[in-house]
Image: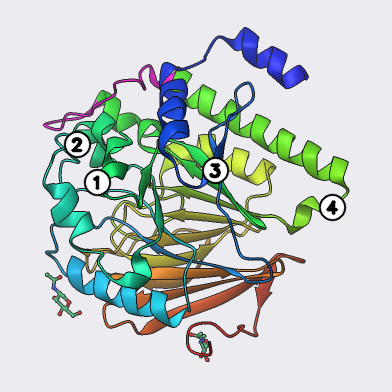
């Protein structure tokens, strides 16, 4: 394969990817396939046939229960139960605030995760990306599989792929993209071990992603099924489009968005701004969904951008997502579990549809 040859010549094989992969192979419960040349670690998440994929998304949460983290967690438990068994939970990063984990023995892992998300309905796999605050601690601790022996739900890597039935998730490590953390960290210390230098890291990541999709395409074309029916969801910590305090992330618009567009990504899901948002792109079918309201929320900041704002809430809450072959349905909830906004997106024409499918209550 041409891509493999190019890759080998590239000489950008990062030790972190291989190391993370080896330890993952030994400890992961969902099956993880060994990547071919230059392809990201890929988890096959088993799904029940004939049933939509159901998940919750929460971000920016780890504050030892404070700032309403515990109340959001309780409502997540209730909503997950009402959804009649979710498949997994996605975290959009800033898992441990303000300074990540100090080590794998940091009590914050218990106080902010194990002891907070205790509902039976949340005893599912959690797939987590890192946020900028996670980089301010011992970042290697947070991606250390040792955490899985404390709580088997916790699956955090830098960048990886989860294949769940008709949905491909691309979890992308966005913190290294943002230039100011490198050039102007101020008082903050970022743990760039196994990442620096920035340019090589980003190049590696984006090239890898291209190859993954080439492979996916190859497999699907060979087996004769329609690639278009696979939903593609990218998950990162940083905003692509946002009307709240951080606003858009220019580095992601320049470097990551073109790759997402080229690969027909349907949804970009992020945290970072402490709010709930739905923005639709005016020049592509991509929908930007922010779920970064897992604890402390920022109120009263609004800065419009030129894409179409569908929904914005600057209080605490979380999001659910239900996806089957034809439709994706996102619902945003507040701290009382009240559905604030919901939207269905159809895969066939990748447009909004008016009719919402049954979700939370009718199981
Ligand atoms: C917790 O949520 C309640 C209800 O929305 C709100 O009034 C209160 O300000 C929140 N507390 C914090 C610390 O954000
Ligand atoms: C979705 O929103 C519509 C109004 O826009 C509402 O009628 C419907 O009940 C909501 N559905 C869910 C599942 O929240």
Considering only order in the chain, which callout, 3 or 4, is on the residue closer to the N terminus?
A: 3
Q: Which residue is mark 4?
A: 225
**Residue 268 location, x and y as percent?**
52, 53
Q: Which residue is mark 2?
A: 104
Alpha carbons under labels 3 and 2: distance apart:
24 Å
Check whether the beta carbons of the residues at disc 1 and disc 4 lie within 8 A of each other: no
Provide the secondary structure element on which disc 3 rests.
strand
Alpha carbons under labels 1 and 4: distance apart:
41 Å
Considering only order in the chain, which callout, 4 or 1, is on the residue closer to the N terminus?
A: 1
Considering only order in the chain, which callout, 2 or 4, is on the residue closer to the N terminus?
A: 2
Bounds of the magenta segment? 184-199
Q: Which residue is mark 1?
A: 150
Residue 84 in magenta stretch: no
The correct choice, above or below, for 76 with respect to 109 in the image is below
Q: Which residue is mark 3?
A: 31
Residue 204 left/right relative to 185: right
Q: Is mark 2 within 8 Å of ligand 1?
A: no
Q: Is residue 194 visible?
A: yes
Say which of marks 4 and 3 sits in front.
3
**Residue 209 location, x and y as percent?**
60, 34
The correct choice, above or below, for 189 with respect to 98 in the image is above
Provide the secondary structure element on which disc 1 rests.
helix
Alpha carbons under labels 3 and 1: distance apart:
20 Å
Check whether the beta carbons of the residues at disc 2 and disc 1 lie within 8 A of each other: yes
Going 63% across and 11% down the picture, which residue do you hit?
A: 8
């Amino acid at each position: 394969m041409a891509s493999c040859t190019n890759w080998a010549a590239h000489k950008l094989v990062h030790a972190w990817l291989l190391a993370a992969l080896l330890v993952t192979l030994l400890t992961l419960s969902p099956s993880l396939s060994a990547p071919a040349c230059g392809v990201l670690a890929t988890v096959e998440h088993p799904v029940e046939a004939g049933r939509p994929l159901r998940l919750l998304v929460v971000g920016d949460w780890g504050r030892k229960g404070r700032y309403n983290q515990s109340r959001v967690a309780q409502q997540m438990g209730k909503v997950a139960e009402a959804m009649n068994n979710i498949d997994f939970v996605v975290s959009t990063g800033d898992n441990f605030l303000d300074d990540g984990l100090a080590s794998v023995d940091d009590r914050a892992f218990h106080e902010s995760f194990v002891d907070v998300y205790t509902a039976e309905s949340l005893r599912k796999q959690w797939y987590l990306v890192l946020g900028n605050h996670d980089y301010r601690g011992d970042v290697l601790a947070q991606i250390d599989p040792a955490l899985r022996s404390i709580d088997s739900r916790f699956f955090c890597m830098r960048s990886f792929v989860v294949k769940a039935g008709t949905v491909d998730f691309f979890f992308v490590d966005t913190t290294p993209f943002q230039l100011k953390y490198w050039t102007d960290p101020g008082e903050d210390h970022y743990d760039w071990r196994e990442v620096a230098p920035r340019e090589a890291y980003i190049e590696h990541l984006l090239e890898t992603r291209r190859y993954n999709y080439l492979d996916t395409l190859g497999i699907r074309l060979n087996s004769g099924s329609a690639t278009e029916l696979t939903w593609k969801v990218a998950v990162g910590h940083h905003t692509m489009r946002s009307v709240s305090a951080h606003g858009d992330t220019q580095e992601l618009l320049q470097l990551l968005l073109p790759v997402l567009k080229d690969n027909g990504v349907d949804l970009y899901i992020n945290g970072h701004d402490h709010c709930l948002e739905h923005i639709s792109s005016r020049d592509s079918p991509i929908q930007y969904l922010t779920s970064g309201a897992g604890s402390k929320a920022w109120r009263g900041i609004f800065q419009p951008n030129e894409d179409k704002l569908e929904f914005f809430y600057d209080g605490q809450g979380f999001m659910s997502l239900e996806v089957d072959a034809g439709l994706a349905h996102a619902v945003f909830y507040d701290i009382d579990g009240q559905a604030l906004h919901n939207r269905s997106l159809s895969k066939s024409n990748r447009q909004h549809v008016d009719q919402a499918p049954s979700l939370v209550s009718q199981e």
